[in-house]
Image: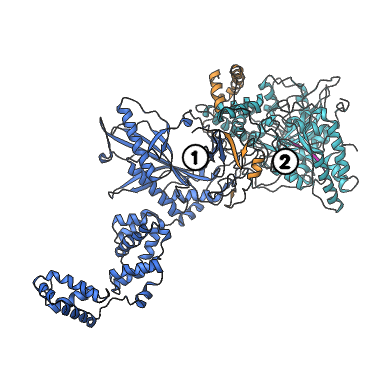
Chain colours: A cyan, B blue, C orange
Amino acid sequence: MSTAFTLAKARDALKARKISSKELTQSFIAAVEQGRPLNAFVTETPEKALAMAAASDARLAKGEGGALEGLPLAIKDLFCTKGVRTTAGSRILGNFVPPYESTVTQNLWNAGAVMLGKTNMDEFAMGSSNETSAHGPVFNPWRAKNSNANLVPGGSSGGSSCAVAADLCLAATGTDTGGSIRQPAAVTGTVGLKPTYGRCSRWGIVAFASSLDQAGPMTKTVRDAAILLGSMASVDAKDSTSMDVPVPDYEKLLEGGIKGLKVGIPKEYRMDGAPPEIAALWDKGADWLKAQGAEIVEVSLPHTKYALPTYYIVAPAECSSNLARYDGVRFGHRAKSARDITDLYEKSRAEGFGAEVQRRILIGTYVLSAGYYDAYYARAQKLRTLIARDFTEAYRKCDVLLTPATPGPAFAVGDKSDDPVAMYLNDVFTVTVNLAGLPGLAVPAGLTETGLPLGLQLIGKAFDEATVLRAGLAIEQAAGFAHKPANWWRAA
Amino acid sequence: MNAPVPNKFIKGQTGEWEIVIGLEVHAQVLSKSKLFSGASTEFGAEPNAQVSFVDAGMPGMLPVINEKCVEQAVRTGLGLKAKINLSSIFDRKNYFYPDLPQGYQISQYKNPIVGEGEVFIDLKDGSSVRVGIERLHLEQDAGKSLHDQNPDSSYVDLNRSGIALMEIVTRPDMRSSEEAAAFLKKLRAIVRYLGTCDGNMDEGSMRADVNVSVRKPGAPLGTRCEIKNVNSMRFVALAVEYEARRQVEIIEGGGAIKQETRLFDSKLNETRSMRSKEEAHDYRYFPDPDLLPLELDVAWVAAIEKTLPELPDEKRARFVAAGLSPYDASVLTAERELADYYEDLAKGVDAKAAANWLNNEVLGRLNRDGLSIADVPVSAAANNAIVAMIAEGAISGKIAKDLLDIVWNEGGDPRALVESRGLRQVTDTGAIDAAIEAVIAANPAKVEEVKAKPKLAAWFVGQVMKQTGGKANPVAVNAALKKRLNLPEEG
Amino acid sequence: MSVDKDTVRRIAKLARLAVPEENLAPMADALNGIFNWVEMLGEVNVEGVPAMTSVIAQKLKWRPDAVTDGGNADALMANAPEHEGTFFVVPKVVE
């Protein structure tokens, strides 16, 4: 059986008993195996998947079943999964097997979903190319025309974006701290939604930067994103920052079109030196929305250029503290033959963390240290207030914002790994959204001349994922993006 | 800051020195579960049995605050007459230690839940000193490292990890070891009255970091040393005494005090430098992004205020107004249980007589038996009946003590016992006269003596009391004897 | 502000990361590259701007005081690199 199903189509076929979850799951298990050259999965759980599929088939046979009954999904390795090794892409977690299940994944299993395995990612979600993973890089299923060069799948949710784009799963979970769902989705021709901060529970997700981290769906279509978000989102008493608002039926809210919708175009996102293809696609997107009855308005987000530097203070500061628990005492990697406790800490952490994570821990430690706190951290949190205010102002004039998703298409493995700042610039269009806690959606909108996917981003008001998804659907329909990467990896 | 008080100075070779003391008291909040997790706070469990994944700092675990702990902090703040901050912030204090699983302690740094307050301490000489409270904040306790189980390893038990503590910080307002100990005693009384901390210092429910410096009277503050984790009032006093002497000797010897963390060794009664804490700390405080600001509702705070019990100072003032000496009032209000017991005992009888009875008879017997007021075998109501019967003239003071012994050892209702055992005081003049005649008849020589020396009448009184088995009313016996022997009224 | 080798050594110590001596200078360079870029935040007048404490309009949730957790000692030990009974074990700590 082909695995080129959308989540919605597979769901409908299962409900209509045209296929069984077992057949579907077996096909995906085979696809995952054949996809190993892509390195998208760090842990495959075929037996668990088959057991879950059998249970789903039994429920479906009785006419029961949840919203995701029998649907095989891939889970980013940042979500703690009970009894299944969870590494966060890092050596420091060793063979950590959580004795608990994250709220988001538990919600998925409660809805009947089937787990295929855990996907590769940048170490502790720090990266935009999946090259910082302790499990090695993931390769983008897409290659440029007439090229065999391996491209990155984006990051940090690179394993998930790859798995979705290569049809190794129906859909996947991701997490997004500065763009880690939207950027990989954009460069793999898939859909990625970062919900409003507080929409999905963070409980059981390995923390990177607590005030920015948010889980979200990575799918083949906008409809699939609406379906998956509906099951991932919840109000969770175990997460103090989980927002106390009911979860609407996002799929139902897709209907109705965008007539009269006010779409803001933030002028500061027109960056000097950006590839003309990006600007052209953006203009095209605005035209598509206009053609469907939306009103296009120019808005200003004056503090946009400060977003990335603000992010690179706030996120490392939080990470330096969040990652202090990886100390070799209670779980994870412990260095051998440590002289004393300090030596144990220093060696375990130096051996366990990769270069980028160490760099960010050092940045974070520095910006919080005595004498520098006010100049860096306190100032960055004030900038964050200004950045959030920019959005509040813009939303007086519009309902949703349209921007490019990334400054360019997927780049070659190794291209940017020597220059941290160049790497950080991949998130230039996405990071503002995290700083302001807003929902953002990346939708595939076209191909570059070299045949690589590009995406557009829609940014909404807090807890207005429904409007973002509806506008995204309008882009998706207008773009008619039906391209698939050539299946080169099966031959590999 | 309080003015220098010369009689509290200590003497060095170069003259007098003033000790300046401030305390940081860690008081464990009375709650069933921990500050940010649902694990139990009960003392004495098996290692790591009361540890949630949150307390163990497992990946992806998040804190959710316990409302009871917030309430207890506010209640304590109100009891310290302190400002309650309606918005406060939880910060992370970052440092590495094996018993600190997250690598940070959730505490409150710049914006604590409680601000400025005050405590009045009562000294032995009857004076009272005000100690300013700088702040009270909520924070997590750390776990425990055991170093003596294995020669090469330390063992870590996280049962304490995450238990709520109130850190109560004073102004440097204390000037002697007595004041420091008295502060701790008073603070302990207040939190126990409030029910916010059990004050059990043996179990570590309350411990103090003692900041000590010395200076020439009137000079600017000297460099302070912090003595960590002192866990009894006596040790606080001893630690201050030792540390102040040590600092004076160093300065007088031409040295300078190094600001450092020290440890009190209760076996040697000395303080010594803590090597592990020597490294300069940089805690990198920042607001915990897993938590939002803690916002309190004015009405909610007001509702807590309405439920505050009468506190030691107020109770003491009321007892003094009722006729007790300030000293007695202080003793009786030091513990809420004792004060409550006293109030029950004093119902409807003379306040002073009740206090004397409690101090001399009840507490005397408790001391003798090594018991505390919680273990007293005779109810306050029973004691109240005994004191009432003395006042009524139904029993003599002597009989009252015997009666208390009976109730103490055998139990029973005092009034019923007086009747069943015939302990009622004899006021019937016929019976007394008969006893007097019997004593006179048996001791003719004494009769002559007493006529010459009227002061010897007391001997007769004693004999008559003996004759009546102690039940005669001594006042009535005295009057009857004087009349019978024609003794003068005075004397 | 410029980060030198000693600063890297100091913050690496605070962060409990063993950074080999020969890596201190390259790390200082890398950090300076980032800090130089971040310097642009200094341009913005933030006077009177409150620091962000929460990105969402949510009141902190309180939970009732009840014992709902614990009894996990075996599950905790299952991932421990070294344990003795239900104690975690670390190299001797000197106080």
Quick check: is A424 in the magenta stretch? Answer: no
Position of the N terminus of chain B by quadrant: top left
Q: Which residue is mark 2?
A: A81
Is residue A286 in view from this perspective?
A: no
* Image quadrant in which you'd find residue A154: top right
> Which segment is the magenta one?
A70-80
For the residue carrying disc 1, how many other residues have a C-alpha within 10 Å: few (<14), some (14-19), or many (20+)?
some
Q: Which residue is mark 1?
A: B111
Is residue B137 in view from this perspective?
A: yes
Cα separation between marks 1 and 2: 37 Å
Q: Chain of mark 1?
A: B
- Which mark is drawn over residue B298? none
Position of the C terminus of chain B by quadrant: bottom left
- Pick the residue in front: A273 or B145: B145
Q: Give, as a three-letter code, the residue at label 1.
A: Asn
Q: Is residue A347 left or right of residue B21?
A: right
1 and 2 marks on the same chain: no
- Pick the residue in front: A37 or A274: A37
Q: How many marks?
A: 2
Q: Where does residue B96 sit, x and y in percent of width and height? A: 55, 33
Q: Is residue B324 left or right of residue A228?
A: left
For the residue carrying disc 2, how many other residues have a C-alpha within 10 Å: few (<14), some (14-19), or many (20+)?
many
- Extreme residue toward the left, this view: B452
Instruction: Give the SS element for disc 1.
Output: loop
Q: Residue at x 36, y 38 (%)?
A: B240
Q: Where does residue B130 sit, x and y in percent of width and height? A: 34, 45
Quick check: is A74 in the magenta stretch? Answer: yes
Q: Give, as a three-letter code, the residue at label 2.
A: Thr
